[in-house]
Image (cartoon, rainbow, N blue to C red):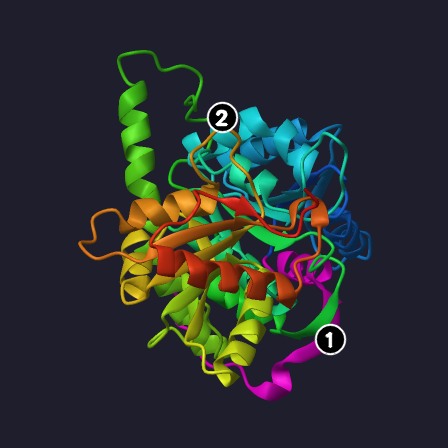
Amino acid sequence: MTSVEKVPQDKITIEGLTGDAAIAHALKQSDVDVLAAYPITPQTIIVEDFQKFAADGEVQTRVIPVESEHSAMSACIGASAVGARVATASASAGLALMWEILYCAASMRMPIVFTVANRALSAPINIHNDHSDGMGMRDSGFIQLYCQSSQEAYDTTIMAFKLAEDHGVLLPVMVGIDGFILSHNVERVEMLPDDAVQKFLGVRVPVQPLDPKNPITMGPLALTDYYFEFKEQQDEAIWNVPKIYKQVEAEFKKMTGRSYGMFEEYKTKDAEIIILAMSTMGGTAKAVADVLREKGEKVGVIRLKMFRPFPAKEIAKAVSGAKAVMIFEKAMSFGAVTSPLAMEVKSALYDLEKKPMVVDFVVGLGGRDVPPTTFVEGYEKTKKYVEKGKAPLYETLGVRK
């Protein structure tokens, strides 16, 4: 880890930025060598803004406008393999087109930063937010971090490079923001000076980059003799992430005063019912908890940031004293016994002798609004389920029946 100091306030630049623009600025400051991407709504602004930086000579990055997202991630792997610091961006169908190469990037241990403006998957075509794309790639081997604000998107993108490139990790990182809700909304963002970011990140030190003078092969073929061992090492690496993430974030906090943790706890200490949600829904949930608290209801919120690796022990400890955990999630797992986030939480609680009831609400698919009233509706349902001692495996809120 590098030695960093608190950045003086007079060195901070404050701007109103969309989530996409905040990410573009973070990439600009992270001394990226190669950015390969293909445009797709609502991610496009990230790459458009970055290409302006490149055209104006503000970065020395090689920007590669490829013919598809499959090619984008392939180009990123090639660049990362020779030792470059690499990033890309996508969403929805574009992310799905990368599917094969997502697994290659993670399995080949390439520390690529992949920013995603989370969006619904077809069909029918929908350009608005839910988490179907991110949940679809949950077993690809990528680290997954979800952000609530433009500030968090900026900070997390910078930290993602340091996390991914750590030799105890060496895995790609997905940084997710809610499409349109955050990608296109303007918020106040404090930006660090370039030299502070570059000192924080340092220079990437590849383990064994491709070198024509010392030729090796990466990822071509492994049959029954070695494939399993590669997967074992990959699994060990992703479970190193919480420890390294804490170190990275502690250093970032020393520089900025900001940290987010693997998840954020809000009024959970005496909470009887805890709302658990990701991304921008976390902000709405906290506002709802404030109002319900004023009415005497013991409600708290956990806003999950790190979905992969899933912080199971920490989540179990955080909710163990509650009567119920009500999950709000923007994805369905068709044919599964419950939805992706609830599945993780239920697994995390499995070994507890006394465990809270898990109530799973699927909301907001295809960009459907999730107003405070939806959380209140879920809360009232949850209280009844607690009284009965039983809840459905999952149910939808805010949808016409």
Magenta-tinted stretch? 1-30
Q: Mark 2 to mark 1: distance in Å?
A: 45 Å
Look at 45% across and 82% down and name the residue there. 296
Regarding residue 352, the answer to whether it shows in the image is: yes
| Quarter of the rendering occupied by the C terminus | top right
Q: Residue 362 location, x and y as percent?
A: 56, 47
Mark 2 Cα-neighbour bin, 10 Å: few <14, some 14–19, many ≥20: few
Identify residue type, mark 1: Glu
Give whichever of 261, 15 is nearer the camera: 261
Left or right, 398 with respect to 171, comes to right
Look at 52% across and 50% down and name the residue there. 361
Is residue 260 shown above or below 180? below
Q: Residue 269 location, x and y as percent?
A: 33, 76
**Number of on-image labels:** 2
| Quarter of the rendering occupied by the N terminus | bottom left
Give whichever of 252, 98 is nearer the camera: 98
Rendering quarter of residue 57: bottom right
Give whichever of 229, 269 is nearer the camera: 269
Left or right, 230 with respect to 376, comes to left
What residue did someone put label 2 on?
A: 212
Q: Is residue 24 magenta?
A: yes
Q: Give the mark, 2 or 1, whose residue is nearer the N terminus.
A: 1
Q: Do the numbered discs 2 and 1 sit on residues whose CB atoms are within 8 Å?
A: no
Identify residue type, mark 2: Pro
Left or right, 128 with respect to 191, comes to right
Residue lying farthest to the left in this orientation: 353
Q: Secondary structure at mark 2?
A: loop
Look at 53% across and 79% down and name the residue there. 290
The numbered dot on residue 15 is 1
Q: Residue 116 location, x and y as percent?
A: 63, 47
Q: Residue 302 location, x and y as percent?
A: 44, 65
Mark 1 Cα-neighbour bin, 10 Å: few <14, some 14–19, many ≥20: few
